[in-house]
Image (cartoon, rainbow, N blue to C red):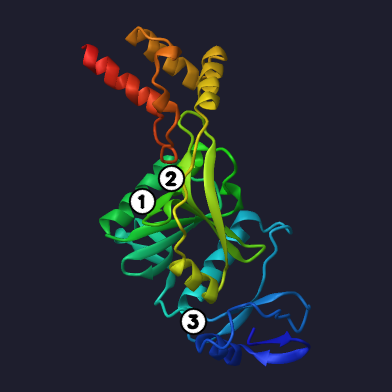
Amino acid sequence: MYAALLNSTLVLAISEAQLVRTGKKALNQSAYQCPNCGGRVLLSVASKQAFFRHHRSLTTGGGEKAEHHGLKLTLLAALVANGFPAKTEVVLAGGAIRADVLVHSQLAFEIQCAPLGLAEYRQRHQCYQQEQIRDIWIVGRRHFLQSKIKASQCQYFRYAPGWGDYYLEADYARQRLCLSYQVHQAPISRRLYYFRAYFALDDQGLAALWQFQPAEQPVAFSASREQAYLRQQIQQRTRLGQEIAAALYQAGLTVTDLPDQLFRHSRRPGTRNPVLQWLDTKKHSLQ
């Protein structure tokens, strides 16, 4: 589609793309409409010939495939509008993987909307490492962070100075990116503490994301709350509770023997809790 309606006036994709590329307007911040059906359309500037495409709804049966496809094209357009030589579906590692969006020779974005097993993730991540390409994963709504971490989310975290451990989400319906940064996990429980910043899923939003430099903010934990959580896990004989109870028994210790400092400091998302690490150290010292 090479033309669309903007405020009841027909505009050409090539003309709108020129305004975006010269910085006179932001990508897809205008309310473009299809001349035929009146539905929302988005401008794509990621190819030599600019064009408009329909904004696919996620509530009409498209589901995760529509979400993935729409995010991929929208992200590609935003990158190209920022001057990156980005491409989609690039075959790498001798055909072992296909990059969702290859930004340049050293950076790729993977967009994950559907479930992904740990083994498949590791295979794709290792292929990127072999190619010396940094892979940053942007997740769809299925994987959005809540107050507690899930095992399936751990693989998508990345680290950057200033941002600390961070997590990138893309909301296709709202056309925005969410950066969860300085993410901390509680010492024992699955509870997460983090800060959030939102950016439009367009060229200006992407530029603002690159330049985002938040101040570092300390996170304090309640040691008594974490201790109570541990006792609850042991009493309820959960998997974690049984593992810690067994380690305490082998070391000849009880929960009250654990140092308070183990319950006061955060850990990186998805890493082993400090109580088990400390008990491992005690176990080795006794051997």
Residue type marked 3: Ser
Residue 17 visible, this angle: yes
> Are the residues at dot 2 and dot 3 in contact (C-beta closer than 8 Å)?
no
In-front residue for pair 133/278: 278
Q: Mark 3 points at which residue?
A: 47
Q: Residues within 10 Å of mark 2 (few under 14, many from 20)?
A: some
Find numbered disc 3 in the image and state the secondary structure of the residue it sits on.
loop
Q: In this view, does 130 lie to the left or right of 261?
A: left
Nearest the viewer among 53 and 135 is: 135
Marking on residue 155: 2
Name the kind of residue labelled 1 in the image: His
Nearer-N-terminus badge (1/3): 3
SS assignment at label 2: helix
User: Image quadrant of residue 196?
Assistant: bottom right
Task: Please say if 222 is above or below 38.
Answer: above
What distance separates the C-alpha of mark 1 from that of mark 2?
A: 10 Å
Q: Residues within 10 Å of mark 1 (few under 14, many from 20)?
A: many
Q: Are marks 1 and 2 in contact (CB under 8 Å)?
A: yes
Q: Which amino acid does label 2 sit on?
A: Gln
Per the image, the residue denoted by label 1 is 125
Residue 213: x %, y % from top left: 44, 63
2 or 3: tag closer to the N-terminus: 3
Coordinates of residue 90 in the picture (x, y in percent): 39, 67
Secondary element under disc 1, as helix, strand or loop, is: helix
Between the C-alphas of marks 1 and 3, the distance is 28 Å
